[in-house]
Amino acid sequence: MKLTRRNEGGWFPSLRSNFPEFFDTDRFFDTPIFKSEWQPAVNIKENDDSFEIEVAAPGLTKKDFNVTMDEGVLTISSEKKEEKEEKEENYTRKEFSYSSFRRSFALPENVDKDKIKARYDDGILNVTLQKNAVVTKEKAKEISIS
């Protein structure tokens, strides 16, 4: 009987050490490509009479968005599910994809909640928030001490 030394790394020990994230499934599936943490880029602009929120979301349609306002918080969300099925004589192939995001913004008090408009053009959702025309500011006043 001949004793041989066993290599714990298997057939390709150097391959395992060079690609630990591939062989360690807990770390491999924890990478950003497998997480659903995608958030679209957002620009917020303030003009004299309005605020504008631009959400970069290419590949979506206006039907994919949901824009709501509740108790001074504007929420922009989207869910898109896609399923493809290809049937051939010898096989059937199904592909599924799912993407979603949710962004919430606390609105300032000078926003007119009844004049919020949204439109989607060329991959960008534009939300316009009109400011109140009259914002009453109390003038400084001196109070006499008696």
Image (cartoon, helix red, strand yellow):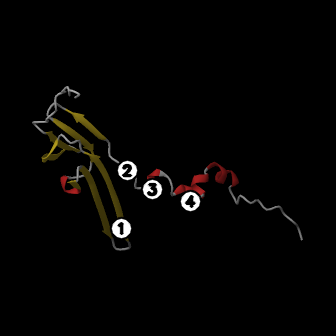
The tag earlier along the polypeptide, 1 or 2, is 2
Query: Is residue 57 at all visible to an observer of this figure?
Result: no
Q: Position of residue 71 (x, y in %)?
A: 23, 53
The tag earlier along the polypeptide, 3 or 4, is 4
Mark 3–mark 4 distance (CA, rounded to whole Å): 11 Å
CB within 8 Å, label 4 to label 1:
no
Residue under label 2: 38
The residue positioned 29% from the left and 49% from the top of the image is: 104
The tag earlier along the polypeptide, 2 or 4, is 4
Task: Please rate how many residues cluster around mark 2, counting C-alpha atoms within 10 Å: few if below 14, some from 14 to 19, many from 20.
Answer: few
Task: Please rate how many residues cluster around mark 1, counting C-alpha atoms within 10 Å: few if below 14, some from 14 to 19, many from 20.
Answer: few
- Location of residue 115 (image quadrant): top left
Front one among 75 and 63: 75
Q: Position of residue 61 (x, y in %)?
A: 21, 53
Residue under label 4: 26
Image side of residue 35 versus residue 59, left or right = right
Front one among 17 and 1: 17
Circle on res. 34? 3
Task: Tell me the amino acid under the disc marked 1.
Answer: Lys
CB within 8 Å, label 3 to label 4:
no
Q: Is residue 79 above or below residue 137?
A: below
Residue at the far left: name it. Answer: 133
Task: Tell me the amino acid under the disc marked 2.
Answer: Trp
Task: Tell me the amino acid under the disc marked 3.
Answer: Phe
CB within 8 Å, label 1 to label 2:
no
Q: Is residue 42 above or below residue 68?
A: above
Q: Helix, strand or loop at disc 3?
A: helix
The residue positioned 35% from the left and 48% from the top of the image is: 39
